[in-house]
Amino acid sequence: MDVFQVEHAHTWLKLANERIQANKEQLTELDQAIGDGDHGINMARGFKEVISKLDANDYDTVADVMKDTAMTLMSKVGGASGPLYGTAFLKLSMAFKGKNVDYQTFIKGIDEAVNGLKQRGKAEIGEKTLVDVWAAVSETLQDNTTFAGDTILQTAKTAMEHTKETMATKGRAAYFKERSIGHLDPGAVSSYYLFEALSLTIDEGA
Amino acid sequence: MAYTGLVLISHSQKIAEGMKEIIRQVIKEVPIQPAGGTDENEIGTSIDKILQAIEQADDGNGVILMYDLGSAKMNAEMAIEMTDRENIKLAEAPLVEGSYVAAVEAGQGKSVDAIIDNLKRHF
């Protein structure tokens, strides 16, 4: 894959939705342990709406796909993941606007998304949030020069698994302080599914 | 006279509505809009609901947003970024006490900034 096209964007979100629907219970259980227990339900509802929206429209640009995804997630998700994922996709949309999404444009978008997530959630790396996964993926992307699915997958997986060992200092899990250690962060896990879907999209579209 | 408006954002529709009831016992004229729960009135918050509440609470003097927990703050901040209106600000204070203090002060004709400053000092 040299250029990330509209159909790739559509496939990415379709695969992400499949993963989120299939793991809805798991995400909810993770969130029951250290949060408010709605992450799976919220993400499943939000992504289902995203797919309905994308399937019902024809898109000329990847930026427009990202924008509709952002808007739908913001208004349909309900928990903290709504404004967070909404912000991430909005930043992607802004970075891709008026551009062919080649590798450099794509990684710039992910970098902007990471900054947006940090700003929106007032979180830094290592606070046991989805930022840990997004920032790790962004860094790996910067180290590469072409779309490589497997690298993204491995990086996201490692970063997601690492959240198990850290203590939450942001989000609802922060109320649990050291009791949050030993649990995966639900947002990091849903972000992992998103990047797993991206890596498959890249491998299929190569 | 036009007052500073208030939007009460809670994860629970009942909390937002209930808070308005508590204030209304005392403060009658200040525009107060609850924005509690998701669009389906489940537990959570909604940017759309917050945006609508801002529209309804703004008499031209601006609006203060009060919130309960973290993710409500994110949605409140996004609503502020998305609205075309001026002088819409988020207060950092406990929802119940903070909203009460803000309503009393709004009833005295104080501005958005004056109320926000006072909430900062108070809490």
Image (cartoon, coloured by chain):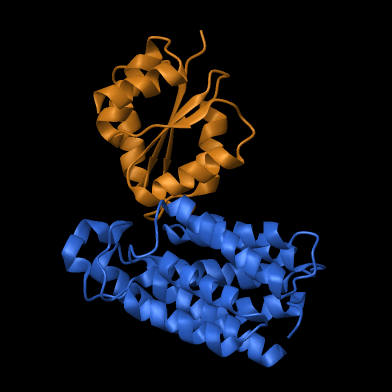
Chain colours: A blue, B orange
Q: Residue at x 44, y 65 (%)?
A: A131
Q: Position of residue B14 (x, y in %)?
A: 33, 43
**Lateral position of residue A123 relative to residue B50, left or right:** left
Relative height, residue B46 to residue B56 (above, below): below
Position of residue A170 relative to residue A183, above or below, is above
Which quadrant of the figure contains the N terminus of chain A? bottom right
For residue A149, side relative to residue A105 (left or right):
left
- Does residue A94 appear anywhere in the picture? yes
Above or below: residue B24 compared with residue A157:
above
Number of dots carrying numbers = 0
Taking A65 as reference, is B28 left or right?
Answer: left
Which of A164/A86 is in front?
A: A164
| Residue A115, x across and y down, in percent | 52, 57
State the image coordinates of residue A94 (x, y, percent, origin top left). 69, 56
Residue plotted at (51% across, 7% down): B1
Residue A153 location in percent, x, y? 51, 85
Q: Quadrant of residue A162?
A: bottom left
Q: Nearer the viewer, residue A174 or B35?
A: A174
